[in-house]
Amino acid sequence: MKLLNEDDDLNPASSMINLVDVFLVLIAALLISIAQNPLNPYSADNVTVIKNAGQDNMEVIVKKGETIEHYESSGEIGGGQGTKAGVAYTMADGSMVYVPE
């Protein structure tokens, strides 16, 4: 009978249950953020991510299926140094025009 009249504020196990609930919500939020990441290793999508577009330290990350390739504009690209070579425009008739810089 004494256990039925015990105050919940004095029970240390109730605070531990609250901590477990907080950690479960945190873990669920982290799993959702991993699943929505475009570079998720478990998705079969083809994705291209460009960091710092147009700057000297631009990075291009290409994900094709399960393989991820990483290119840097100031680093090694295909065995050599890579820099921006120019701009390509698509005309109204569908033709492409390349303008070197």
Image: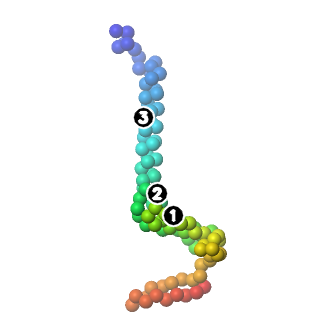
| Residue annotated with mark 3 | 21
- Give the amino acid at mark 2: Pro
Counting from the top left corner in percent of width and height, residue 72 is at: 60, 69
Would you say the residues marked 2 and 3 are in contact, meaning their CB atoms lie under 8 Å apart? Answer: no
- Does the rendering let one see residue 93? yes
Pick whichever of labels 2 and 3 is earlier in the sequence.
3
Q: Image point 41% across, 59% down: which residue?
A: 43
Dividing the image into 4 quarters, which one contains the N terminus?
A: top left
Q: In the image, which disc is placed on residue 28?
A: none
Pick whichever of labels 1 and 3 is earlier in the sequence.
3
Would you say the residues marked 1 and 2 are in contact, meaning their CB atoms lie under 8 Å apart? Answer: yes
Compared across the picture, whether 28 is left or right of 60 comes to: left
C-alpha gap between disc 1 and disc 2: 9 Å
Front of the two marks 1 and 3: 1
| Residue annotated with mark 2 | 41
Name the secondary structure under disc 3: helix
Instruction: Judge by depth and name the residue closer to the eye, 86 or 7.
Output: 86
| Residue annotated with mark 1 | 68
